[in-house]
Amino acid sequence: HAGMMSIDALVPIGKGQRELLIGNRNTGKTAIAVDTILHQKHNNVYCVFVSIGQRQANLARIVRLLQDNDALSYTTVVAGDASEPAVNRYLAPYVGCAIAEYLKDQGYNVLIVYDDLSNHAIAYREISLLMRRPPGREAYPGDVFYLHARLLERAGNFKEGGSITALPIVQIQGDDITAYIPTNLISITDGQVFLDTRLFNAGILPAVNAELSVSRVGGAAQTKAMKQVVKSLRLELAQYHELLGFAQFGTELDPVSQQRLSRGERIVELLKQSEYETYTFVDQVLQLFLLREHMLDAIPVKEVNAFARQFVSYVQSVYPNVYTSIEEQAELTEELNSRLQEIAYEFKQTFSS
């Protein structure tokens, strides 16, 4: 559970899964990984953060952040900085993985982040060229193909001991996911979260592109309650993006299309989330419940976020028993459904932004 609604609703990550975070520079890939680490605080998950070929200033900032949020008590940081020799940068992820495997054998569930594997491949290329190995495509050696397969095959959900969930990060240039290393990683992992510069610049954070992102584990990684509230979400988002294209031509849209557009706007708005602010799965279910029940349709787009967040705290403070029963049952029974509808209606009467 990553604690980010756009990921947990559209591309859920399960125990032992390998999910690639892919995007251009500065699209918030590391931010998502760090947020996920911070969210594991009460989930009894041990985290390993491997930094490969990054600037020391960047790493220092991340370590400081983990420190301020009390996350270093369950996180190990392995650093192969840009200033290190190529061999150290090349070995860093394997060292991180060995630590993760040790913890897995102790029975822990482990989350490991590799930030990032493009730098890892570059370090390996540097070593290989110095060793006079024949260069192949993009000057990488022929066996770069198995470099990452070897690393990521070590993650998984195991019969004995715990699990290792891997979040490799890869950087691309100009949205080109067809480059050598990215395609290789896409074929190894169980799905990817694609972060889009366009969305990032439009202020949609986290900038998850729902069309290009997939989880090959899908609903198996979601609670029943979550599945119930996100049934048609992906489809509605897709319809919204398709209609956006038409709307930009300034064409007159029929009422149905207009309704889909305004609903899409609200979905996009609801899935926005600020950095270092993560939600439990109950918080997410409650917010997406409002969406499913068309409770947000009449709310102005700018107030959607406030409305949903306040609804969650309203349920938490006024009806704690409802909140805990969703948590315990992990599904929305008919009784809970009708109860939530009443609460939502009641809250709508009192809400003012």
Image (spheres, rainbow, N blue to C red):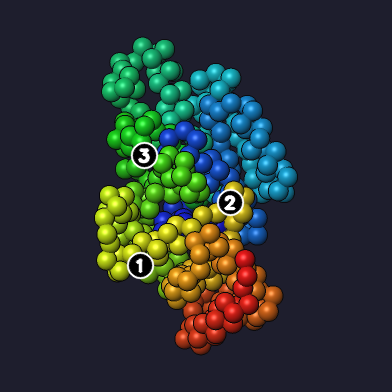
> Residue tagged by mark 1?
259
Position of residue 262 measured from the top left corner of the image (x, y, whole percent): 40, 63
Q: CA distance from mark 3 to mark 2?
A: 28 Å
Relative to 58, is 65 above or below? below
The dot on residue 341 is: none
* Nearer to us: label 2 or label 1: 1
- Label 3, residues with CA under 10 Å away: few <14, some 14-19, many ≥20: many
Q: Residue at (44%, 74%) from the top-left corner?
A: 294
Relative to 183, is 84 above or below? above
Q: Secondary structure at mark 3?
A: helix
Q: Nearer the viewer, residue 337 or 47?
A: 337
Q: Residue at (68%, 42%) from the top-left corner?
A: 65
- Label 1, residues with CA under 10 Å away: few <14, some 14-19, many ≥20: some
Describe residue 51's horizontal placement relative to residue 27 as left or right: right
Position of residue 126 measured from the top left corner of the image (x, y, whole percent): 43, 18
Position of residue 177 measured from the top left corner of the image (x, y, whole percent): 33, 37
Which of pointers 3 and 1 lies earlier in the amino acid sequence?
Answer: 3
Q: Is residue 43 visible?
A: yes
Q: CA distance from mark 3 to mark 1?
A: 39 Å
Q: Residue at (51%, 68%) from the top-left corner?
A: 299
Q: Secondary structure at mark 2?
A: loop
> Residue tagged by mark 2?
274
- Label 2, residues with CA under 10 Å away: few <14, some 14-19, many ≥20: few
- Would you identify the image quadrant in which residue 264 lies? bottom left
At label 3, the amino acid type is Leu
At label 2, the amino acid type is Ser
Which of pointers 2 and 1 lies earlier in the amino acid sequence?
Answer: 1
* Nearer to us: label 3 or label 2: 2
Q: Is residue 280 visible?
A: no
At label 1, the amino acid type is Gln
> Residue tagged by mark 3?
185
